[in-house]
Image (cartoon, rainbow, N blue to C red):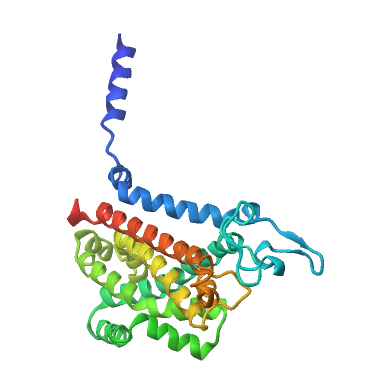
């Protein structure tokens, strides 16, 4: 009887065990169909990028040997309409558009992650320092941020890309620098609301250093808005990189970047619309999915919207 009572008490303790904040966030997230749809689109993009070589394997070219599928040119089958052999048709060089869209997902995903990484590391650092110390430090950082925000993000990216030159790395640097102020202001506002909490005062009273307080106590309590901003920032980064490639300042052919594919196909948009329709749909779908995911995360993680 005693063993049975202990088992019942243990079961009650497990049943009434307090759930973590992230578990509650996931429970609310699952109830949001729009956020789940955005998550599904993002997962499809990630899986497509990971398994691009399996989905679209390399082919044999009689002149060049084994080449990536997105580079193989069938000049006798240029501007072909969608078919079973070429689901998205071919472009003006006879390259399979489906293969190029699939491999282009890798570039878009890489651009999104690297741009968000650059802007997050620098922007979060500046925002945390400005919000924690305040005073002159805050004024200097925020005035510099205001100057950058006064220039539209895409124009700033165009200026930096024009100075650095075209290329994948230069595009990521250009778009990443333009996104830094957004993270800085977001994190600063969160730090201002956290730094006066009692647990921060307790950490100071036991002699914790400023670096430890910012990294171990303040930043973990600011992760929710950072995650939302990062998700939204990925969509903006992919769209900005596509825009730079479209005007010739981004990733150059034959790399299968969706923006450059649009730029190449715009000359044939009236007679052969498949050259622009499918890359444009890929950009729109991914940006739409990331925005839906970001909106869902904001609804879930923002305590004011609970």
The reply to whether residue 299 is in sight is yes
Asked if residue 198 is positioned above or below residue 26 in the image, the reply reads below
Looking at this view, name the residue that lies furthest to the bottom.
Answer: 163
Is 239 left, or right, of 264 in this rendering? left
Residue 217 at least partly seen: no
Q: Image point 56% across, 59% down: which residue?
A: 88
163 lies left or right of 22:
right
Which residue reaches farthest top? 1
| Residue situated in front as seen by the camera: 81 or 1 | 81
Quadrant in the picture for the N terminus:
top left
Identity of the residue drawn at 33% across and 61% down: 228
Which x, y percent locates residue 294? 33, 59
Q: Quadrant of residue 119?
A: bottom left
**How many dots with numbers?**
0
Q: Position of residue 233 (x, y in %)?
A: 38, 68
Residue at (48, 82) in percent of width and height: 247
Vertical side of 89 occupied by 254: above or below: below
């Amino acid at each position: 009887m005693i063993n049975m009572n202990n088992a019942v008490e243990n079961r009650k303790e497990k049943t009434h065990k307090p759930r973590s904040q992230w578990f509650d966030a996931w429970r609310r997230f699952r109830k949001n169909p729009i956020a789940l749809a955005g998550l599904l689109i993002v997962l499809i993009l990630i899986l497509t990028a990971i398994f691009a070589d399996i989905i679209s394997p390399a082919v044999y070219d009689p002149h060049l040997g084994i080449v990536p599928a997105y580079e193989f040119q069938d000049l006798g089958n240029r501007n072909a309409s969608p078919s079973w052999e070429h689901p998205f048709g071919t472009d003006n060089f006879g390259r399979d558009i489906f293969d190029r869209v699939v491999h282009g997902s890798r570039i878009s995903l890489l651009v999104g992650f690297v741009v968000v990484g650059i802007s997050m590391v620098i922007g979060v650092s500046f925002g945390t320092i400005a919000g924690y110390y305040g005073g002159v430090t805050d004024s200097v950082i925020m005035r510099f941020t205001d100057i950058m925000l006064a220039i539209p993000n895409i124009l700033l990216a165009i200026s930096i890309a024009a100075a650095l030159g075209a290329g994948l790395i230069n595009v990521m640097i250009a778009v990443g620098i333009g996104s830094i102020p957004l993270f800085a202001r977001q994190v600063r506002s969160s730090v201002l609301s956290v730094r006066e909490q009692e647990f921060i005062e307790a950490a100071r009273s036991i002699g914790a250093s400023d670096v430890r307080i910012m990294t171990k106590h303040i930043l973990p309590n600011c992760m929710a808005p950072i995650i939302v901003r990062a998700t939204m920032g990925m969509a903006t980064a992919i769209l900005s990189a596509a825009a730079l490639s479209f005007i010739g300042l981004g990733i150059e052919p034959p790399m299968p970047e969706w923006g450059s594919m649009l730029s190449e196909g715009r000359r044939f948009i009236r007679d052969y619309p498949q050259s622009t329709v499918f890359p444009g749909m890929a950009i729109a779908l991914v940006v739409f999915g990331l925005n839906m995911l970001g909106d869902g995360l904001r609804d879930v993680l923002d305590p004011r919207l609970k």
